Amino acid sequence: MEGKICPRHLLHIADKKIEVYPGSEYDSPVIYLNTFAGEGEKVYQLLCNANCQDFTLAAISGLTWDHDMSPWDIPPISKNDTPCTGGADRYLQLFTDKIVPKVEGLVQGRVPWRGLAGYSLAGLFALYSLYHTGIFSRIASMSGSLWFPDFKDYIFSHKMIRKPDYLYLSLGDSESKTRNPYLKTVQINTEDINAFYRQKGIDTEFQLNPGSHYQNTLQRTALGIEWILKK
């Protein structure tokens, strides 16, 4: 796909904006990427230079981040933070019922598999989705907010609707170096979840990247998607 130039389709569904970068071949997979600030095009360009197989990228923006990406309500975790208001179930229903069919109506041929990717809370959402829908077979969670209260226990105590074929986790190596009692758990939680999934027989990759949560976010996102595309 190096040097690929491809048209972009723009969809509006409910209050969400979906940018679709279609594959050029028949029967190519679709990667869905929930984005915080509309960074889908930049991630797509990085992937085009990574010699991946042909694929379609659907980047969703216009999200109410702390609502759509959070599985349940939690209060602010720091003085200047906002609460999370647990809208993931409702958003996932919109996603599967409306967004996926519209996106895949633009794809040539059949879709052999779907991947779901996300950074930060969207990485948390990607894992959460596995327990509520069986449509995704590959997951990429980059710097996922796996510090989220009770989320690790949720994973350990609930059954996936469908185990993914491949699952990618990453984290910045300084993300847990904080006094915040929630955020400081992110590395141990991510490592424990990685080990748990491996024990379940899932082909899981965990990468520890240099830097904080806010460093090289586009590159880290592209690396995770590249990994699930090249499996």
Image (spheres, helix red, strand yellow):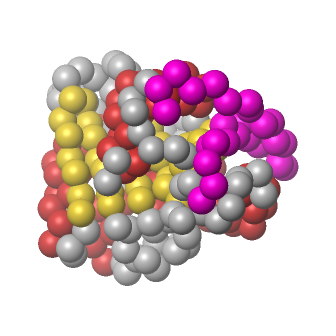
* Quadrant housing residue 108: bottom right
Residue 197: x percent and y percent? 23, 66
Question: Residue at image x 77%, y 51%?
Answer: 106
Question: Residue at image x 34%, y 19%?
Answer: 215
Residue 11 sits inside the magenta stretch: yes
Residue 22: x percent and y percent? 67, 42
* Quadrant housing residue 35: top right
Residue 230: x percent and y percent? 34, 47
Residue nearest the viewer, comparing 54 with 207: 54
Residue nearest the viewer, comparing 21 with 139: 21
207 lies left or right of 125 = left
Residue 82 sits inside the magenta stretch: no
In the depicted structure, whether residue 80 falls above or below residue 170: above
110 lies left or right of 149 = right
In the depicted structure, whether residue 11 falls above or below residue 159: above
Say whether residue 71 is visible. Answer: no
Which image quadrant: the C terminus? bottom left
Looking at the rendering, the stretch of residues picked out in magenta corresponds to: 1-27
Residue nearest the viewer, comparing 166 with 63: 166
In the depicted structure, whether residue 212 falls above or below residue 85: above
* Quadrant housing residue 225: top left
